[in-house]
Amino acid sequence: MPLYEYDCPLCGRFEVLQKMSDPPLSQHSCGSEVRKLMSASSFSFKGTGFYSTDYKKSSSSTHDSSPAPKCAAPKSEACGACPSNKAA
């Protein structure tokens, strides 16, 4: 269930854990009318497959000297500029 943020003119901002299908709150526990706010969502990537856990190079290697893989054919102008499409 997501957290929704509301603004009460007397009490300030507060969060409520609600189902997505629940109607928005209209009153706070103090009796004042509340306004639902848009807030930034926050999430955390966990597990493997993300830059910080899988693709970060160690500080001991400064340059990878292996050649770039050769593309079969450029798919767009951007691919045509790819170093792997340059003639060796």
Image (spheres, rainbow, N blue to C red):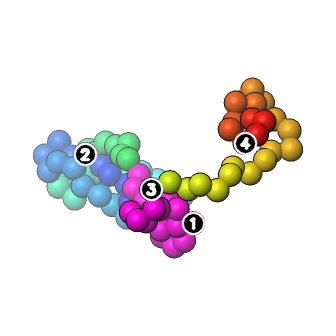
Tell me the residue that label 4 is attached to: 84
Residue nearest the viewer, comparing 87 with 14: 87
Q: Is 54 inside the magenta-drawn segment?
A: yes
Of callouts 4 and 3, the N-terminal one: 3
Tell me the residue that label 1 is attached to: 49
Q: Which residues are magenta?
A: 41-62
C-alpha separation, residue under disc 4 versus residue under disc 1: 24 Å
Q: Residues within 10 Å of mark 2 (few under 14, many from 20)?
A: some
Q: Amino acid at mark 2?
A: Asp
C-alpha separation, residue under disc 4 versus residue under disc 3: 20 Å
C-alpha separation, residue under disc 1 versus residue under disc 3: 22 Å
- Give the side of residue 53 with respect to residue 15, left or right: right
Tell me the residue that label 3 is attached to: 62
Secondary structure of the residue carrying tag 2 is: strand
Whether residue 18 appears in this view of the structure is no
Q: Amino acid at mark 3?
A: Thr
Tell me the residue that label 2 is attached to: 7
Residue lying furthest left = 10
Q: Residue at x 13, y 46 (%)?
A: 10
Secondary structure of the residue carrying tag 4 is: helix
Of callouts 1 and 3, the N-terminal one: 1
Dominant SS type (magenta): loop
Q: Residue at x 51, y 73 (%)?
A: 47
- Give the side of residue 26 with respect to residue 53, left or right: left
